Amino acid sequence: MSVPAKTYYLDNNATTRIAPEVFEAMVPFLTEFWGNPSSAYGFGSQVHKHVERAREQVAALVGADPKEVTFTSCGTESNNTAIHSALVTTGKRHVITTAVEHSANINFGEHLQKMGFEVTYLPVEGDGSLDLHRLEQAIRPDTAIVSAMWANNETGVLFPIEEIAAICRSRGVLCHTDAVQTPGKLKIDVKSLGVDFLSLSAHKLHAPKGIGMLYIKRRTKFAPYLIGGHQERGRRGGTENVANIVGFGRAAELAGASLSEENSRVRGLRDRLENHILSHIPNTVRNGAKEPRLPNTTNIAFDFVEAEAVLMMLDLVGICASSGSACTTGSLDPSHVLSAMGVKPMRARGSVRFSLGIYNTDDDVDYVLKHLPPIIEKLRSISPLNPEHPDNEAYDIAGARAKHEQDLAIAKANEVVQA
């Protein structure tokens, strides 16, 4: 099997390539300045200064005071920490989140329920939006925190976090937002948002994996999740990941500078891709509201095909896309986000997410638009999911899916043998 000469990467919501400027900033802290920033001697203390400089850069990205920024390992840790802290410091046992959160929240909520806590998962509308009246009705005297993502990682749909935070303040409830998908795409100002906690993950903004941050509003009571040394002012134990922290700081500067490009050139690429697919490939529909939405994300359902098959054939020609969150890849169940929006299972299983970034070009979009239509046409011509399939005298959805999964398994086995 031949390997495509070039990779056309349209899965930036899963992760992003490290920016050259970020890599260059990190190298000295892997080769020369590798001391422990908590050490008393000069070789370590000079490294500490760079950690604090990075903290200032990340704080500037979100409009926070540097003392309000705590470095973590990732967005998942930041999300878990915020919710954990609220439960510990308030002594309350009820959490509110939404049915379309990242698995970092969904699965943590299920874990909390096993531990005896109560979790309310707010439903969403058909376009992925949130009814704030449901939120108001769900808040109880024993509610410790409301945790709602700002931008959905699968559809790009935005929640009105500023309004959500205002409702929480009026009811004396803490508010956290998973803002992992927003840097470089939306202007972030924690003061105007009014949240108590905000999570970011560096690998979503062209920095390395393994570093994230949690904004903790000043004077908010806080209980650490990782207990250890005095690092991060006692808020997160563990020796600082200096090179990644420095890279995060440089990436934060670049993300702030790329806002205009994301909202103009990248949005234009996304719209051209989406509009061409919807107008030139029949039986397609966008999942989620057109606006408000991230400028880089489109999630499209291709009826009568399986997304897994589409992604396999796109991969063969060097195109990277996804069928949802990278953290749920491999699951046989349809996307929990699309299911919560009321998308029928067969349509959800045929949905593909394209998420563009600042390194994408017009040539990338042209390449996808050249290869995608014939791929969909070919898959539909052989798919028993298609009611117009010549062998489909009596269309049975359950039977069709079983046959299609069997065909996919055979195709994968043949592919391994040929390789």
Image (cartoon, rainbow, N blue to C red):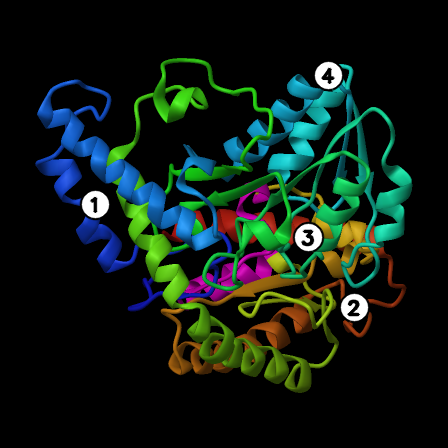
User: What residue is disc 4 on?
Assistant: 91
4 vs 2, front mark: 4
Tag shown at residue 161: 3
Counting other residues with Cα less than 10 Å from the Cα at mark 1, is it few (<14), some (14-19), or many (20 or more)? many
In the image, what residue occupies the spot 63% across and 69% down? 379
Choose the circle earlier in sequence order: 3 or 4: 4
Tag shown at residue 26: 1
Q: Secondary structure at mark 1?
A: helix
Choose the circle earlier in sequence order: 1 or 2: 1
Choose the circle earlier in sequence order: 4 or 2: 4
In the image, what residue occupies the spot 28% across and 46% down? 247
The magenta stretch spans residue 97: no
Q: Amino acid at mark 4?
A: Gly
Q: Is residue 283 above or below residue 348?
A: below
Query: Which residues lie in the magenta part?
Result: 308-329
Counting other residues with Cα less than 10 Å from the Cα at mark 4, is it few (<14), some (14-19), or many (20 or more)? few
**Left or right: 21, with 2 as reference point:** left
User: What residue is disc 2 on?
Assistant: 391
Q: Secondary structure at mark 4?
A: loop
Q: CA distance from mark 2 to mark 3?
A: 50 Å
- Image position, residue 275 (x, y; %): 63, 83
| Residue 315 visible in the shown view | yes
**Residue placed most toward the observer, 399 or 153:** 153
